[in-house]
Amino acid sequence: QKEVEQNSGPLSVPEGAIASLNCTYSDRGSQSFFWYRQYSGKSPELIMSIYSNGDKEDGRFTAQLNKASQYVSLLIRDSQPSDSATYLCASGMERGFQKLVFGTGTRLLVSP
Amino acid sequence: DGGITQSPKYLFRKEGQNVTLSCEQNLNHDAMYWYRQDPGQGLRLIYYSQIVNDFQKGDIAEGYSVSREKKESFPLTVTSAQKNPTAFYLCASSSRGRSQPQHFGDGTRLSIL
């Protein structure tokens, strides 16, 4: 059974702090990884994708991938109350189309 | 504006009734997917389709059916055989190619009357 594991949280951080969200995956064949943000009652929104070991930065977001440890993380710098949401981690195989495996998500709460 | 349109936003099903959820995309994506999300749970794959006139069962296909007659459209029917249909249903699509992410519609919330 291919799995993606996330701590359900909530992860509480004060405004302006760095939020660190973590994810582990079981399938060593996974090649692509995605972070989605889901506000309560809304659909998931893609915020980051990462395919190679190391860091990838996009604005306040940094995704980190360590394939040897089967570990993916998302850092949110200067956290804002509007970042409060559930963050879903997903992994996929590098094929013609993506059948993704999703984690259950980590709920992030950013307090003013 | 390119995107994925799901309708209706809210849907109520009576006992013994089949209902159909619509999903249309104008992103020219080859692959389309249907997920179910229950409160506090992750996304579970119901069906997916890579090309027109072809689709495969996901992890929880029992009680559901789909069709893919057009590239743009992938409707999901929740049949009376699905005894616990109350959930948030999400349609997604992705383009063919290496490591393409999935993009989601706004979802349909289905409840039992």
Image (cartoon, coloured by chain):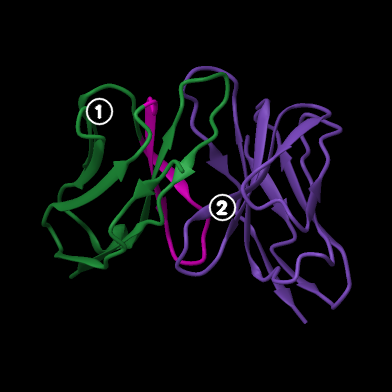
Chain colours: A green, B purple
| Coordinates of residue A9 in the picture (x, y in percent) | 27, 65
For residue B13, above or below residue A84: below
Taking depth in this image into account, of A90 and A40 the one nearest to the observer is A90
Q: Which numbered dot is residue A96?
A: none
Q: Residue at x 21, y 27 (%)?
A: A68
In the rendered view, tell whether residue B74 sits above or below residue B76: above
Q: Residues within 10 Å of mark 1 (few under 14, many from 20)?
A: some
Quadrant occupied by the C terminus of chain B: bottom right
Q: Magenta span covers which residues?
A: A29-48
> In this rendering, is residue A20 above or below B79?
above
- The residue at 12%/57% (across/down) is A16
* Residue at the outermost bottom position: B113
SS at circle 2: strand
At label 2, the amino acid type is: Arg
User: To which chain does the residue with label 1 belong?
Assistant: A
Q: How many angstroms separate mark 2 from mark 1 (CA)?
A: 24 Å
Q: Is residue A30 left or right of residue B29?
A: left
Residue B15 spot, x, y in % from top left: 85, 78
Residue A25, by quadrant, is top left
Percent of width and height locating residue B32? 67, 36
Find numbered disc 1 in the image and state the secondary structure of the residue it sits on. loop
Relative depth, front residue between B27 and B95: B95
Which chain's residue wears label 2? Answer: B
Which quadrant of the view contains residue A69?
top left
Asked whether residue B76 appears in the rendered view, the answer is no
Q: Residue at x 34, y 39 (%)?
A: A26
| Residue marked by disc 2 | B44
Number of callouts in the render? 2
- Give the amino acid at mark 1: Lys
- Vertical side of A26 occupied by B27: above or below: above
Q: Which mark is residue A67?
A: 1
